[in-house]
Image: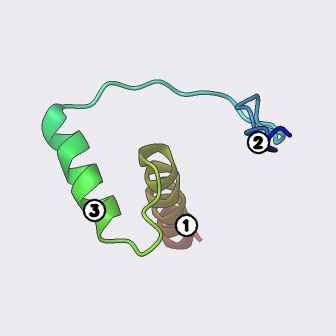
Amino acid sequence: MRNFVPMQKKMGRPVADTEPVTIRMSREMIREIDDYRRTLEDLPTRPEVIRRVMADFLKGVRRDEG
């Protein structure tokens, strides 16, 4: 009898209308991002923490403009 091994979900294109952004950062900045994300309860990935920080920043900009 064979053991059932569930298939892992494969990475693919995101469902949402998104576009990749590639940037270079100093190692110090990456280290600071990693240190910050380790303080968060859900330990987001680097890209996720950058999305969150940018979303918060843009909310603040809109608030200041409005």
Q: Badge 1: few (under 14), some or many (20 or more) residues near its Cα, within 10 Å?
A: few
The amino acid type of the residue labelled 2 equals Val
Establish if 62 lies above or below 33: below
Q: Is residue 35 left or right of residue 60?
A: left
The amino acid type of the residue labelled 1 equals Lys
**Residue linked to disc 1:** 59
Location of residue 29 by image quarter: top left
Q: Which colour scheme appears in the figure?
A: rainbow
Residue 7 percent coordinates (x, y): 79, 38
**Residue linked to disc 2:** 5
Residue drawn at the location 19% of the way across and 46% of the way down: 31
Dot 2 or dot 1, earlier in sequence: 2
Location of residue 62 by image quarter: bottom right
Viewer-closest of 39 and 8: 8
Number of the front mark, 3 or 1: 3
Q: Which mark is residue 36?
A: 3
Cα–Cα gap, marks 3 and 2: 36 Å
User: Callout 2: helix, strand or loop?
Assistant: loop
Residue drawn at the location 75% of the way across and 39% of the way down: 9
Q: Is residue 59 left or right of residue 4?
A: left
Dot 3 or dot 2, earlier in sequence: 2
